[in-house]
Amino acid sequence: MMKRFFVTVAAFALAACSNIQLPHRDTDPYANPFYAKYLNTGSAIDAQITKTLDALRANPKSPTLHNDLGQLLIAKGFPKDAEREFERSVNADRHFYPAWYNLGLVRAANGDESGARRAFYRTVALKPGHSNALFQLGLIEEHQGDTQAAVDLYAKAYGINHALLDVQYNPRILDSHLTHLALIKLYPKEHNRATMQFARTPSGYKDTTAVEAVSPQPAPQQIVTPAPPATDQGAQKPPH
């Protein structure tokens, strides 16, 4: 009796499972994205997003289009969707450093500091001397308590790009309490470079090793001798 009961329960369970509809997985992420319902304001940014979506439907593996859409979605106010686009961009091309940098920015803004750190280090690995990524890494290291690493990163960033010290260009410099230490570290290098007085070549110096440009000689003119005038065989000679 008990065995028949369990068999009956199992049969009902299988029947119920057969009636469950699995959610449809959309293979085209751009067929109807979540933010599409908000693209009806008639604004220029909405038009740009729509145009980029159309381009991605035609070329879904373009790293530049994913990167462009990510920036547009940030401006529209969809940071999570933007982060997904930057991830799609670097997945399409692992060496596309602008998307790595943008991914670091949006992850940092979303509170994912470890993810941002990985993205920024990937940026400078692909593009050594990327001053903005170096500065962002300095902020992360400072926030995590590694003062020496932060100062080193700041000094390197400022040495490459002095504009990072301008609050109008880089408002996040106000978030750092280590700028003075970075400038002290940078000072010897900047001082040496600024005080170097290089000697210029004196006027009138003749470089004897220089190869003078040889002016092309004009081609000799061919002298054409005029032909003698033709004589009329039928004409009579004048009398002597």
Image (spheres, rainbow, N blue to C red):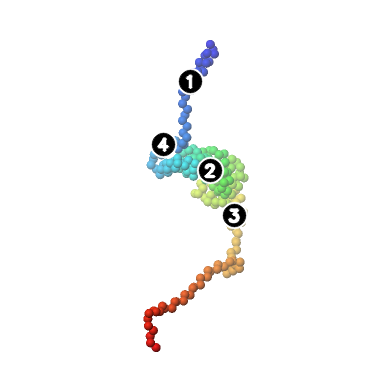
Q: Residue beneath label 2, please?
A: 93
Q: Indicate the secondary structure of the residue bearing disc 4.
A: helix
User: Which mark, residue 15?
Assistant: 1
Q: Residue at x 49, y 44 (%)?
A: 64
Check disc 1: other Cα within 10 Å, few if <14, some if 14-19, many if 20+: few
Residue 20 picture location, percent across and down: 47, 24
Residue most extreme to the top: 1
Q: Earlier in the sequence, mark 1 or mark 4?
A: 1
Instruction: Return the x and y of residue 14 as percentages of the image width and height.
Output: 50, 20
The answer to whether marks 3 and 2 mark residues whose Cβ atoms lie closer than 8 Å is no
The answer to whether any part of residue 64 appears in the image is yes
Three-letter amino acid code at the position of disc 3: Glu
The answer to which of marks 2 and 1 sits earlier in the sequence is 1
Secondary structure at numbered mark 3: helix
Q: 10 Å neighbourhood of mark 2: few (<14), some, or many (≥20)? A: some
Which residue is outermost to the bottom? 240
Res 45 visible: no
Measuring 51% from the left and 46% from the top, which residue is drawn there? 171
Q: Position of residue 199 (x, y in %)?
A: 60, 63
The CA span between labels 1 and 3 is: 78 Å
Q: Nearer the viewer, mark 4 or mark 3?
A: 4
Mark whose residue sits in front, 1 or 4? 1
Mark 4, residue position: 37
Q: Nearer the viewer, residue 147 or 21?
A: 21
Give the mark nearest the N terminus, 4 or 3: 4
Residue 80, horizontal then vertical, whole percent: 49, 37
From the viewer's perspective, is residue 201 above or below residue 67? below
Residue 137 occupies quadrant: top right
Q: In the image, what residue type sits under mark 2?
A: Asp
Instruction: For marks 3 and 2, give the CA distance.
Output: 37 Å
Residue 69 left/right relative to 126 = left
Q: Amino acid at mark 4?
A: Lys
